[in-house]
Amino acid sequence: MRILVVGGGGREHAIIKKIKENKDVEKIFALPGNGGIARDAECVDIGAKEIDKIADFAETEHIDYAVVAPDDPLVLGCVDALEKKGIPCFGPSAGAAIIEGSKVFSKNLMKKYGIPTAEYEVFQNADDALKYLETAPVPTVIKADGLALGKGVIIAETREEARNAVIEIMKNKKFGKSGDSIVIEEFLTGPEVSVLSFTDGKTLIPMVSSMDHKRIGDNDTGLNTGGMGTVAPNPYYTEEIAAECMEKIFMPTIRAMKAEGRTFKGCLYFGLMLTEKGPKVIEYNCRFGDPETQVVLPLLKSDLLTVMQAVTEERLADIKVEFEDKCACCVIMASGGYPEAYEKGYEITIPDNLEDSVFVAGAKLRDGRLVTDGGRVLGVTAVSATLEDAINSAYGKVEKIDFKNSYSRSDIGARALEAIRRA
């Protein structure tokens, strides 16, 4: 089989490495891929948002199956364009990808179908939003409606911070048209859980739960990032909570999307908060999360491509999806200065025996050598029988990998270990 994977980050590298395990795979193309992915697939210089070029390339190269991984191309209709060419795909249509593409849509969907989430108000006018904030409780959460590279959510601790966020998003257009509408929502507290799921629009199979670490600094301090590390499974996500989520959140969401004429097929990501009043949805993503994918897929025992094809063909109920009864930890190695200004172009040294453990996100090839080319550069993953061993192993690998100005948090998984010890 000839496979096409759209995207070029650590998530895509994890997907490609897993798909490579299938013996029927003859060749994998990555559009655009990156310097690390180039070791596992043929990278083609076509951007993930160049939908027509992607579809034409897939047709010309006789692609048998395509995986569209990032949010932007999904929302822009990449799956629709590929399917028009007769190419089967993993990923939702543009009509279904709106569940991530519009925060207003997803909040209204949850309200309409009684899916538990934070209380909220929607605003299309900055002055109306500012007036509302005069009496709204704080802390509060301000969300740009559209996609914003994962940075369109601002937790405002004070009324002044909330006002500044509204002005930045709606008046100064920090996120462009994504901020034409905003959601101002209740601030929830409790442990956060990420649950990725396979769904064909009828059946839903959750993957192993995970815990992301969004802040740049130890002890969850500093600016939000795309994710500085993950562990799986999440110790807060018990069997009882999982059953409650399936009954009150997961299946109701799938049924709601079908009722709206937007049947969702692909990977649906549930960002959950375990509040005192039960689990609530913080956000939906219409694709694999990053870096959650880098701890979830290494635990998948079943063949990923087989599962994906079952999703596409709406026969997920007919196959068995199994995960290892183990733990995984991924530590992100970032460029010093991220998520603000940082330098690029530093050579990366990865020992040969660790390459299988490393997912490359922000790097390119220069004269045959791998050099830094982004804020989050590498995801270094370890799998072990216990979470403590997985964490220690991941950090042991990080110590053996080198590039100038590299930065990693030193406490990935610490909260999860604490929860296990308290249990």
Image (cartoon, helix red, strand yellow):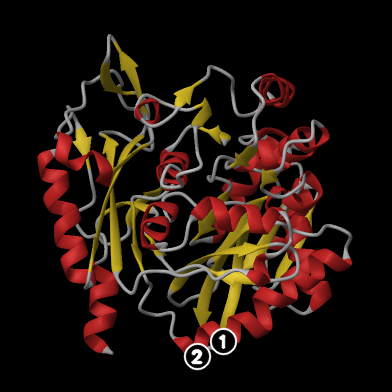
- Above or below, 403 relative to 249: above
- Residue drawn at 23 percent across, 46 percent down: 408
Q: Element under label 1?
A: helix
Q: Quadrant of the C terminus?
A: bottom left
Type of amino acid at the residue the image marks with label 2: Glu
Q: Position of residue 22 (x, y in %)?
A: 46, 47
The residue indicated by pointer 1 is 243
Mark 1 and mark 2 residues within 8 Å of each other at the beta carbon: yes
- For this view, does 300 lie left or right of residue 220? right
Q: Position of residue 49 (x, y in %)?
A: 65, 28
Q: Position of residue 73 (x, y in %)?
A: 67, 36
Q: Residue furthest front?
A: 24
**Looking at this view, is 222 or 214 the one in front?**
214
**Looking at this view, is 133 or 92 the one in front?**
92
Type of amino acid at the residue the image marks with label 1: Ala
- For this view, does 2 lie left or right of residue 249? left
Is residue 93 visible in the rendered structure shown here? yes
- For this view, does 120 lie left or right of residue 355? right
The residue indicated by pointer 2 is 240
- Above or below, 29 relative to 273: above
